[in-house]
Amino acid sequence: MRYLLALILFIGAFTSKADDKLYTQTELNHIADGIKKKGLALYLNQKMYWNSYRLINNTHPEILDSMGGEIGYLDGIIYRCVLYSKGNNAIPIATVTYDTTYNLDNGFVDVQPRLFSASEAELLKMQQAARHLIEIDTLFKHYSNVYIITIPLISKNEKEVYVLSYLKGDDKEIEFGNDYQISFELNRQMNYRKLHKQSTFCRFDNIDSIVGHIHVHYPEDPPFMTPTDICMSLLYEKHRNMHNCTVISDRYISIWNGKMLYIVRRDRLPN
């Protein structure tokens, strides 16, 4: 009830404006499905990396000193997390494979020397290009208390890297923002944008009182909830009791309930 009341008040305080294009509900359902799939892919990638790091730290901790990064992907129904070495000529130093349960206890660690597969090599190129761009372009903001996470995704004809921020050392606060989308064209040209004009910080001093999170997307931001919003909500859902996330823009409301994403037009809401 408190979450619903806050949502109603928040909507009322956010002024809507006209736009040349307003999507139909059928179109919004299709858009929501695409955002959800990417959000789940980002979440799975980061969750599997955390699991893989723990597994290797328990079984082969000496490998971590030479680790330069990781990439992850679905291979059919199997998920693979590949940790690779530092330097320009990176090679796989460990591969962790998970079955369909994605359970930490069911991960299989392989540290045998090998080469990258073609798809792994492409993911690595994308991640390395994104990291270089992040270093040289002032659009990307760096803070001493923030880890920058780069997650490459390949789906159908899309090649993208999503950049997320993870606060260091404070397990009672989450940042929605300082995130970016980098898209790779056929000629390897990169198009990139910042997904949130401003960051929103959620403080969780009293976890039992948390039922959801609401934040605004400004006109410069995407009009809908982003895949990174879904990813961050899922990563902290169980630990922070945060089952609902709502994003309000000037034309739409996006609601994530932990399983489904709903997008509705604000002008279709009852007065």
Image: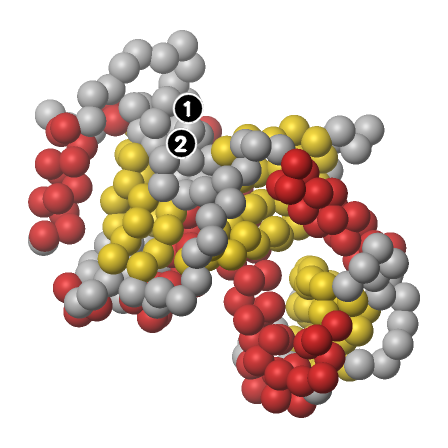
Q: In the drawing, does residue 198 fall left or right of residue 93?
A: left
Q: Position of residue 202 (x, y in %)?
A: 28, 53
- When asked about the image quadrant of residue 44, the answer is bottom right
Q: CA distance from mark 2 to mark 1?
A: 7 Å
Q: Which quadrant is the C terminus positioned in? A: top left
Mark 1 residue type: Glu
Examine the rendering and report whether any part of residue 118 can be seen: yes
Of residues 198 and 110, the one drawn nearer to the viewer in this rendering: 198
Of residues 54 and 29, the one drawn nearer to the viewer in this rendering: 54
Of residues 115 and 256, the one drawn nearer to the viewer in this rendering: 115
Q: Secondary structure at mark 2?
A: loop
Residue, x 65% and y 29% (percent of image)? Answer: 191
Relative to residue 248, is residue 24 depicted above or below? above
| Residue contact at pointers 2 and 1, CB within 8 angstroms | yes
Mark 2 residue type: Lys
Residue, x 30% and y 49% (percent of image)? Answer: 201
Instruction: Identify the residue under disc 2.
Output: 197
Instruction: Identify the residue under disc 1.
Output: 220
- When asked about the image quadrant of residue 69, the answer is bottom right
Relative to residue 115, is residue 51 depicted above or below? below
